[in-house]
Amino acid sequence: MNTYFLMDRNITGKKPTFHQSGPKSNFYRALILLGLIGGGIWLLSQVGIGPQFRVQPLFLATPTATRTADSYLLAAEAYFNAGKIEDPADSDAIDAYRLALELDPGNALARAELARLLTYSTRLLSTSAERVARLEEAREESAKAVELAPDDSTVQAIHALVLDWSASFAVTIDQYQKWLMEAEQVASLAYHLDPNNALALAYYAEVLLDQGKWPQAEQHARQAVELAPDLMDTHRVYATVLETFGQYRVAIEEYEKAAAINPNLTFLYIQIGVIYRELEVYDVALEQFEKAIKINEANGVQDPLPYIAIAKTYSRMGEFFIAALNGEKALNFDPTNPNSYGQLGDIYVRARNYEGAVPVLKCAVLGCTAEENEVGGADVTGLPLTNIEVAFYYVRYGSVLAALSRPGLNYCPEALLVLADVRDVFPDNGLLIGIVEENEAICRLIEETPAP
């Protein structure tokens, strides 16, 4: 007998109603049951039964698992290894460290690692102003880390790294010397806290190198690599030391080892390319710069440095038209970047386009308004005279002004002012002072020659 037939037997009337045959429910029995249930609930509340046994209301949202600080730290490390130090359009290592510190603000090592990444990220920024601001943030984070863990060798070592890199972007010579001195003191402390800390040795070597203490720098850098051959930082610093010594082949090997550990850090490929350019192996140099461009494109990073490097390479090869195109392409990323104008001006000088070099170098050295800026069309703040690279922009500008000067069309007053700045800041640099004196002599001769 099928189920449909049984149900059909109980259908009556025009509107189907379904009911069950048998005795009806007793009203008083139901009332007693309800009373017992209510009493049971009251009793449970009185005995203080734990919340784990409470009946939850229906249709509550499913609880979401809360991420821990450790999970963000693991994500930060993974992002760094993937080359995603900073990505404006997506999550990155810096973001992950910041989220971890929101959950665990007393984690000194995590705060120091954030400072380290902020420092490395300056290699991905296109303007000096951005780099200065980023390094200021890095100094704040590393200083907080030191306050939290003053006896931690790694925390102190990273603080030394931040101070050392900050010195490269100091606005004044006094500030440069102050940060470099502090960097040496902190690096020395990190080393004495733990002489076997490879990071402390590596960053100490980098500081010593910047202070011109080359033998000590080489010794510390070599020991760091021997202690930790699996760290990118040790190979990077050792490569930098070897490059300074002119040991280019070995330096390339060390940079390549660093890139093998962290294959998406573009500044490593740029540095390898720079060395190949010095060795005049131009095709390999260009390959390295192209690698950096592809990594930047994959990570959404707009970095003019690879294009500047390509431009300088073609300039060395005598292909000035292609060099200028790449230099101008670098300016498209940020038309307010004075360093890009300095690089482009240098390319114009090498191409003997002196008239074109003057306004571009002026933007780099003295700054310019958007109306004066014939190439980028934007306001540019000139570079402070704080390092040798900028000093060469200054002497380039002064030299071009002197070269274009003649009786009746004298650019020497401005040229002599710029060259005097170089003399005041770098009085002991024989190469720079030689260029300054040569152009001062040209201007004296022009000023002594009567105008026609």
Image: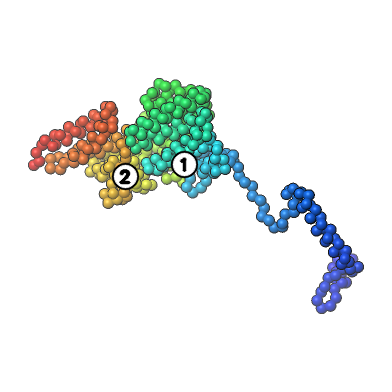
In this picture, is 183 found above or below 25?
A: above
Whichever of callouts 2 and 1 sits on the residue coming sooner in the sequence is 1
Q: Which residue is mark 1?
A: 295
Q: Nearer the viewer, residue 275 or 286?
A: 275
Q: How is the image coloured?
A: rainbow
Q: Residue 55's quadrant in the figure?
A: bottom right
Amino acid type of the residue tagged 1 in the rendering: Ile
In the picture, the quarter occupied by the N terminus is bottom right
Q: Residue at x 20, y 37 (%)?
A: 416
Tell me the element at label 2. Answer: loop
Q: Residues within 10 Å of mark 2 (few under 14, many from 20)?
A: some
Q: Nearer the viewer, residue 51 or 377?
A: 51
Q: Residue at x 52, y 34 (%)?
A: 148
Q: Which residue is mark 2?
A: 381
Res 238 seen here = no
Q: Nearer the viewer, residue 209 or 80?
A: 209
Q: Residue at x 48, y 32 (%)?
A: 158
- Marks 2 and 1: which is nearer the front? 2
Q: Position of residue 18 (x, y in %)?
A: 83, 70
